[in-house]
Image (spheres, rainbow, N blue to C red):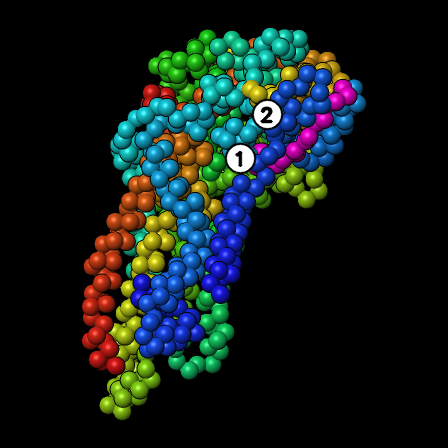
Amino acid sequence: MTAVTDHGPAADRARARSAAARGPGSRRRLRTPWRTRLEILFFVTPALVLFAVFLVVPVVQAGRYSLYDWNGLGPMDDFVGLANYASALGNEVFRGAVGHNLTIVVLSILIQLPLGLGIALLLNREIRGRTALRVIIFVPYVLAEVVASVVWFMLLQPNGAIDALLESIGLGGVVQLWLGDPDVALYTVMVVLTWKYLGLAVILMLAGLQGVPEELYEAAQIDGASWWQVQRRIAVPLLSPTIRTWVFLSMIGSLQQFDMVWILTAGGPANSTTTMATYLISQGTDRSLYGYASAVAVLLFGISFVLAALYQTFVLRPRSERRPETEVGR
Amino acid sequence: MKHPTRMASAVALGASIALLAAACSGGSDEGSTGEASEGADVTLTWWHNSNNEPGRGFYEQAAADYEADHPGVTIEIQALQHEDMLTKLDAAFQTGDTPDVYMERGGGELADHVEAELTMDLTDVAADAVETVGGSVAGWQVDGRTYALPFSVGVVGFWYNTELFEQAGITEAPTTMDEFDDAVSALRDAGIAPVSVGAGDLWPAAHFWYYFAVRQCAQDVLSEAVTSLDFSDECFLRAGEDLEHLIGTEPFNEGFLATPAQSGPTSASALLATGQVAMELAGHWEPGVMQGLTEDQLGLGENTGWFPFPQVDGGEGDPAATLGGGDAWACSADAPPECVDFISYLLSDDVQIGFAENSMGLPTNQAASGSVADPALADLLTVRDSAPYVQLYLDTAFGENVGGAMNDAIGLMFAGDASPQDIVDAIQSAAGTA
């Protein structure tokens, strides 16, 4: 409670302090927490209610639905235990979807991390048109995912703009059925995802670079370090908290990927791009297997949760433990 | 000092909760009208998908005429875009807040609604109207009881571009699969993509398998299988083999696995409408869809041609049998009794003739048969009425779950990933777990 009181309005604190100095401050203290509590309640209630109504209740409900064979109509009375989970885990398409999600997670990090880092380091220099370049790189991220997907969908049609472009620069030979070939579609989606989300990586890393003190660069330059050495020994190590956070965001986003895939391929062709989210939507709303789709949703939640927890434990925690070192370094 | 502050906080707190509560429960007080309706004023809510002219205005007029003849009855219309209507209906069925008059597509979906007691049994209360509609009503019956009145039933066949056929030197529309194969090669030799299929949406691809099943299987085998979901008869394997052969001849547009059915300029319908392919397997809706996809609103215009799905070698099905489906008016289970009278009125000679004159579909009331304005639809009506039977689209017939699993498996065959046996297995296993 004391900690909370400390955060109260400055006026209150001042009054409380002077009351305490006067001696008979106990009554005063009793009253202040009441007010503070009300204040907290007032500010927190809307958020808590929203949290409960739109998050806790649905999650609990999904858990409940997942134990029934239910088509969404009439009473839910066909209790099947864990059968929905068993059939999801035994389903080839679902397992494929998990594989696609993990592919997206890994490829996103492998592609976007070096690219994002490289671009951020370059854009951190004093070059002409830097602001314009930053804007250009960030624009795809600001664009609504649905809008971007529809545009790419049109561009990627057979004999569409992308094919025409490739042919005009003499690369007609690489033209594929970008969205229509089961062996290619997932990689096409990956390219579009990279285009879309690279901006976020760049902006985050640029922000992180702003936190690297100028003196360190200067000191290194005085010591005769090359630009490359400065980046490698100073900028990148000091950027690592930002990078870890970005990896975390990217991972969670990849696991929940829906919009882009849904519009570009709807999980097809031949289930070659299904993600867990598109699979659960197609099973739930298209097939009316609400119990089964809920089981898939719970599995998606579980997988994301476990990966997030593991990452938190093994990657994000050491950062906070190492932090004093960095602090000393500064 | 203390009290006002607390009061203020408490009031504000209460207000924020109340606001949230209000936001959550907004607008739930509709639809509770007209349950006890003896002599009192009744309001019927009616959802339909004719959200464009002339259909929209036609239905408004029909409702106004009905209101004029039936004082005390008010009809509240919501004209929704088709997909929006389906989404809204799904939600309405789950919350029990269904409109009084709505559209049923029949088959397994209807069976689910009947099982959940959401739909009114019309067998006795609308006996006359059921008789008017005749044989078409079969797709909307469950266990011999009728639950909806079909107002438009169409058939699926090949729509083709007569000009492109001419260019390829094809003088007669193919009547057998062998002739069809020849037509495909003739078109390809002339540099024309033969067939477009919206396999990205699965069902247009699945229609090929359904039709091969209609051609390969005797009527009683097929109708038996639709109810028992037992697909052990060998004719279903032959349907898959026929499809495998057809896919092997590579008749489809480039990138067909990702082609949407009807939406946008790259859809299968648009490819046909803009002369980029010679034909497409589609239902009675195709001319209308193509009109919407072309700038001049004419679709293929005078070059529109139609031929029935060709016959297959050794098929046991009637060569004149067709695959089709349609829409029917239904009353929700708790709709006031006036609902039955109103949907019977929608099937009356007058309304169905107007429906036909506006080319809104293929009327089921024989009295309207001569009134279909659009020549392409009029031809289809003849085909439908001379068919020994119209098999409801199999995915609709089986319901969303089994139908969806079947369409997925057929889609896999189009991608070269499923055998004829896989399709049969997929249906059986979905049916077993349904």
Q: Is residue B427 above or below residue A237?
A: above
Disc 1 marks a residue whose amino acid type is Thr
Disc 2 marks a residue whose amino acid type is Met
The residue depicted at 48 percent of the width and 75 percent of the height is A131
Percent x, y for residue A118?
Answer: 34, 71
Q: Is residue A233 magenta?
A: no
Element marked by disc 1? helix
The local crowd at label 1, few if under 14, some if 14 to 19, many if 20 or more residues have their Cα within 10 Å, is: few
| Residue A4 quadrant | bottom left
Q: Is A55 displayed left or right of A310 in the figure?
A: right
Q: Which residue is mark 1?
A: B87
Which residues are drawn in magenta? B70-86
Disc number placed over residue B108 in the picture, else none: none
Disc number placed over residue B103 in the picture, else none: 2
Q: Nearer the viewer, residue A265 or A318?
A: A318
Question: Which chain letter goes with mark 1?
Answer: B
The residue depicted at 46 percent of the width and 71 percent of the height is A134
The local crowd at label 2, few if under 14, some if 14 to 19, many if 20 or more residues have their Cα within 10 Å, is: many
